[in-house]
Image (cartoon, rainbow, N blue to C red):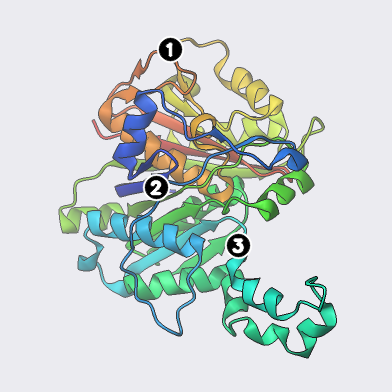
Amino acid sequence: MAAVVATAAEAVTGLGLGLAATLAALRSGRTAVAPEAGLEAFGVGAAAHVVPLPPTHAPDGPTRVVTPHGTLLELVARAAHGQANLGSVPREAVALMIGLGMVDSPAADLEAAVAASRGADGAFDLARFFQGGFRAIHPHWPLRMLNNVVVGQLAADLDVRGDNLVLAAEADAGARAFLEAREALDSGAALAAIVAGVSETFGPAALLRAQLRGTPGLVLGEAAAAVVLESEASVKARGVIPVGRLVGGATGFEPSDLGPGPSADARVRVVREALAQAGRTPDDVTLLLVEGDAVDEADARRAVFGRRTDLAVVAPSVALGHLTSGGPAVASALALAMLSTGEAPSTARGTPRALKRGGVALVLASGSAGGAAALVWEGVP
């Protein structure tokens, strides 16, 4: 399968409103992970919230269904769309591939219904709720819980009408969105694709899901990123300057015996397959972006790279929290930026590592059920 070209990348994280701001914060050793009270029941004491967002200037009105996911997606996708000047690409030829964390209803959506359903003692009365309290819930509320509605609105806002899909709800799904976009471009079904990933919104439901997945104590974060991919032909026809290339990628599945996530063997297989697709070897990789939260990942890293000391290893989750489906998009955007600047900041408060311009970066991703994924990015010399 042919390589595809990245022509724009943007991100919003707990460290910055924009990819450049996030990278600068990482260089300075900052972290978005901070103590947070009231989380003891979930076995954690910290979280990484996204930075306060400005108005997105998205169309609004009585028929619009806005969610925290939608706000983040709108912000990063609009920015990447503009950077790549996709307005010059026929809208029917622009695909939209999204990795989306689980969607939760904001508590404020149900407050009026709860208040209207209280009994004389002030406690919630289920009978009163069904007698009429439920009418205080906006009729569009159920739509906020459907991830394809979020993406449909984004497509309408950007006026893109090509192939589209939503994959949920963990990091392996976020990585698969990039591979689906590459297939659409390689087959000619699209000339360009906006690939975005967004985390879950932090809250009790997200924390409970982490426990149910078998990962209590996981520090969750909030972030989103978008990368624009294009075919070589489209880039040449439009005279666009690339920011990198997606040259390989693979997914696989095999649950680990040690805990949630894929086995070390599954991780090794997808890495080797992705590198083979790219026509690269482990020795060609200069930058490795890991999740950093599983023994199997460390074992797989040693199996592939041995004890190399010249490999820059970055774990975005250390500074940004675990981002579920948003992780691969954020890591990919960071990888492209690091390859462009020639420097990889240390998320372990160490010395930044110099990178060869035009080098090769490998992004790892996994899902708690056993899915494994790897993406191979090449910088622009």
Q: Are there few (<14), some (14-19), or many (20+) residues within 10 Å of tag 2?
A: many
Quickly name the residue at label 1.
Answer: 310
The residue drawn where x is 39% and y is 43% is: 246
Q: Quadrant of residue 257?
A: top right
Amino acid type indicated by mark 3: Val
Left or right, residue 152 beside residue 342: right
Q: Is 98 displayed left or right of 134 in the figure? A: left
Residue 22 drawn at (x, y percent): 36, 37
**Contact, CB < 8 Å: mark 1 with mark 2?**
no
Viewer-nearest of discs 1 and 2? 2
CA distance for labels 2 and 3: 18 Å
Q: Amino acid at mark 2?
A: Val
Question: How far apart in space, not on screen, are marks 1 and 3 (Cα)?
Answer: 40 Å
- Residue 87 placement: quadrant: bottom left
Disc 2, SS: strand
First-in-chain label (1 vs 3): 3
- Tell me if I can see residue 84 in this picture: no
Picture disc at residue 206: none
The kind of residue tagged 1 is Asp
Report which residue position mark 2 lands on.
12
Quickly name the residue at label 3.
103
Residue 228 is at least partly visible in this image: yes
Near-viewer residue (218 or 300): 218
Decide if residue 273 is on the left or right side of residue 41. left
